[in-house]
């Protein structure tokens, strides 16, 4: 099965960048369809039941909305050029970094898009959704109206005047320099071959932080090796290299992983805790709301409030399930790394009331006993 795939998305879309890069690397023939207002109305909404992109249409005319589900499906159908490492430490680190890219790099991605000077570029980009064939000035007018809705999500993520200095300091003084130093030595996160973690990072680092004018200039200035990685991740017919031998996790990633467990993982763990409470308190509800309240997070010395996203539990479950699936000897190898980066205790988390994806929506997985101790 090598043809008939369609990717409904847009150049400005964070997760479309992830999906497009993956399909390109895997050499899977596909047609990219721009998600105009007409496409949303006639295809995306009726076929998926949601209003999110990207969406993958299979040759069987099934429609898949989430990038992680897309990758799971296509890795099974196209096992060649796999992006899932074979060894335990690399496999777990790859999954952790995918979750970090999907969930936590949203902070700089959304901040730099909406709070820096990306205009009129970004309004024209959003205007293409409503009026793809109209002149730029008309697209800007329509795009400003559409974009205001997305800009309204920014404070919900905890991006406020109070937290913005900490976000910029973290991104410009830690994330960019650390990734630049890493990609000066390695083509990808785990060697000469991209893993699923590379594609998780690709979404925010390409569609927002590389492609938008203001953040693109910052990346070019601070992290030229990261720029080369972004551009490499979009190239066709890349040679298939190898991951590092002996299950090595590069030292250049350890600081990033350590800070994740200090600041990002508490957010994921608390999101799962509150999501399980919601499930317990709403036994008659099968489908979960996207937002179930607010909680406090910390970045550096700053604390701020943000929305609790129920979807975060689903992402966390995938990583915990991977960890709990390791054999005893694999667990011992992984635990030595987790102890080094401060993640061993977090990985012992139990999720009793699980969630699942059903028809592109998040639902309660009633009665599941998996991952229960």
Image: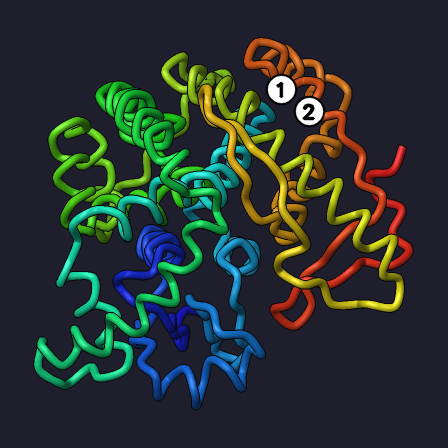
Given contact means CB atoms under 8 Å apart, are the residues at marks 2 and 1 in contact? yes
Q: Element at badge 2?
A: helix
Q: Which mark is residue 84?
A: none
Report the quarter where the C terminus lies: top right
Return the x and y of residue 198 as percentages of the image width and height.
39, 39
Residue depicted at 69% across the width and 26% down the height: 347
Relative to 348, 240 lies left or right: left
Image coords of residue 277 (percent x, y): 81, 48
Residue 91, given in percent of the width and then of the height, sits at 55, 31
Mark 1: few, some, or many residues within 10 Å (few <14, many ≥20)? many
Q: Is residue 89 above or below residue 278?
A: above
State the separation of the CA atoms marked 2 and 1.
5 Å
Residue appearing at x 67%, y 15% in the figure: 335
Residue 111 appears at what percent x and percent y?
33, 45
Q: In which quarter of the view is residue 287 placed? A: bottom right
Point 65% across, 43% down: residue: 318
Residue furthest to the front in view is: 162
Give the residue at x 30% y 72%: 32
Nearest the eye: 178 or 28:
178
Task: Give residue 101's quadrant in the image.
Answer: top left
Q: Residues within 10 Å of mark 2 (few under 14, many from 20)?
A: some
- Height in image: 326 above or below 14? above
Tell me the colour scheme of the image: rainbow
Left of 218 or right of it: where is 280?
A: right
Residue 205, quarter of the rendered image: top left
Label for residue 343?
A: 1
Report the label total. 2
Where 273 falls versus 4 (above or below)?
above
User: Residue 346 bears which disc, if any?
Assistant: 2
Viewer-closest of 57 and 79: 57
């Amino acid at each position: 099965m090598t043809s008939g795939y369609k990717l409904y998305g847009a150049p400005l879309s964070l997760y479309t960048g992830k999906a497009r890069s993956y399909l390109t690397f895997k050499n899977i023939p596909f047609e990219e369809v721009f998600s105009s207002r007409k496409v949303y109305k006639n295809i995306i909404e009726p076929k998926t039941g949601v209003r999110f992109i990207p969406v993958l249409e299979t040759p069987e005319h099934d429609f898949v909305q989430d990038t992680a589900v897309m990758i799971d499906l296509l890795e099974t159908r196209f096992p060649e050029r796999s992006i899932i490492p074979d060894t335990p430490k690399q496999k777990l680190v790859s999954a952790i970094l995918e979750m970090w890219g999907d969930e936590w790099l949203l902070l700089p991605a959304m901040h730099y898009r909406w709070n820096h000077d990306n205009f009129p570029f970004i309004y024209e980009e959003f205007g293409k959704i409503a009026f793809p064939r109209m002149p730029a000035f008309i697209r800007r007018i329509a795009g400003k109206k559409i974009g205001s809705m997305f800009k309204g999500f920014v404070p919900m993520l905890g991006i406020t005047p109070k937290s913005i200095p900490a976000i910029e300091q973290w991104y410009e003084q830690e994330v960019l320099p650390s990734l630049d130093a890493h990609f000066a030595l390695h083509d990808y996160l785990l060697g000469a071959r991209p893993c699923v973690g590379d594609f998780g990072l690709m979404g925010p680092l390409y569609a927002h932080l590389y492609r938008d004018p203001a953040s693109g200039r910052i990346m070019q200035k601070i992290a030229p090796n990261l720029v080369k990685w972004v551009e490499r991740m979009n190239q066709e017919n890349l040679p298939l290299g190898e991951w590092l031998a002996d299950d090595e996790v590069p030292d250049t990633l350890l600081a990033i992983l350590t800070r994740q467990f200090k600041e990002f993982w508490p957010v994921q763990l608390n999101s799962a805790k509150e999501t399980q409470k919601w499930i317990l308190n709403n036994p008659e509800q099968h489908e979960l709301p996207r937002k179930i309240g607010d909680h406090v997070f910390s970045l550096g010395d700053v604390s701020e409030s943000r929305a609790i996203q129920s979807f975060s539990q689903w992402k966390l479950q995938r990583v915990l399930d991977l960890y709990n699936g390791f054999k005893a000897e694999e667990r011992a190898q992984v635990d030595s790394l987790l102890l080094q980066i401060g993640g061993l205790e977090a990985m012992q988390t139990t999720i009793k009331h699980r969630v699942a994806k059903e028809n592109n929506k998040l639902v309660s997985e009633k009665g599941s006993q998996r991952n229960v101790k």
